[in-house]
Image: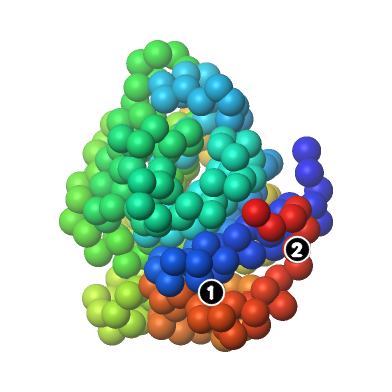
Amino acid sequence: MPSISELEKIASQVRRDIVRMVHAVNSGHPGGSLGCTDYFVALYFEIMKHTPQPFNMDGKNQDLFFLSNGHISPVFYSTLARSGYFPIDELSTFRKINSRLQGHPTTHEGLPGIRMASGSLGQGLSNAIGAALTKKLNNDDTIVYSLHGDGEIQEGQIWEAAMFAAHNKVDNLISTIDYNQKQIDGDIKDVLDLGDIKAKWQAFGWDVMEMNGNNMENVVNTLNEAKTHLGKGKPVMIIMNTEMGYGVDFMMGTHKWHGVAPNDEQLANALGQLEETLGDY
């Protein structure tokens, strides 16, 4: 297993991939992608039991991941490529005509690692719950993971799924909310305040944890601890505190980089802050 230092080096490369991908096509969502990088790297390089090749859509006897906030596809694609699901040089096709790496992940192109289309927000928890229940029916003791945006949980379908999971004791599921407190139109509190989200999830019957999503050691330790909470009759929700744009100083602390690509000068500035550790694609 890689050390925390090695995971941090992988995360630096993934962040380089993110800013280069969105810059190349002047399109994409760097802010949330950068904020969630440590989570993705920890999950795919340390936490999950998974086999990149050959990719099996059924995922039997493997841990499964579902990205619900699909607009942060750059970090997902980079992590999948860097962990062996498809060639790293395919990252250069991001958002281009006929590419498998569309702006929001889709399944019809057959991209290894993608288990659901997630262009429309709010649907990922329902998908993850379905997969978790299937594992129970198949006596498969592996784990289902899902990631959601905090703005996304303004969607009603999320709360229907939350009730369903608790009622049906879906205790092989570890979901995470990227709690950067920002969405495309501004701060969460100004658009539609979520209130006390920890208390809300607890009231819905979930086992709720918190972690610093921009501290690799804390991410790894919390995800490992979350595994010990499974099998006890409750689904697990981790509230992951992150900074949108983390790792690139001028992208942090603002919602303005939610869906805006850097120009040439900004790209050079960003890359100057991120160590190239695995080689650029």
Q: Residue at x 26, y 47 (%)?
A: 123
Horizontal relation, residue 273 to residue 25: left or right? right
Within-10-Å neighbours for mark 1: few <14, some 14–19, many 20+: many
Q: State the image coordinates of residue 226 (x, y, percent, origin top left).
A: 56, 44
Eye-nearest disc, 2 or 1: 2
For residue 245, the mark is: 1
Location of residue 257 in the rendering, given as x and y in whole percent from the top left corner: 44, 78
Q: Give, as a three-letter code, the residue at label 1.
A: Gly
Q: Quadrant of the N terminus?
A: top right
**Image quadrant for the C terminus?**
bottom right
Q: How many numbered marks appear?
A: 2
Label 2, on which residue?
276
Residue 37 lies, with reference to residue 42, above or below; the image says below
Residue visible at 54% across and 54% down in the picture: 92
| Left or right: 148 as drawn, with respect to 61 | left
Element assignment for label 2: loop
Residue 35 in view here: no
Per the rendering, the mark at residue 261 is: none
Residue 250, by quadrant, is bottom right
210 or 46, which is in the foreground?
Answer: 46
- Looking at the picture, which amino acid does disc 2 mark? Glu
Quick check: 89 left or right of 30? right
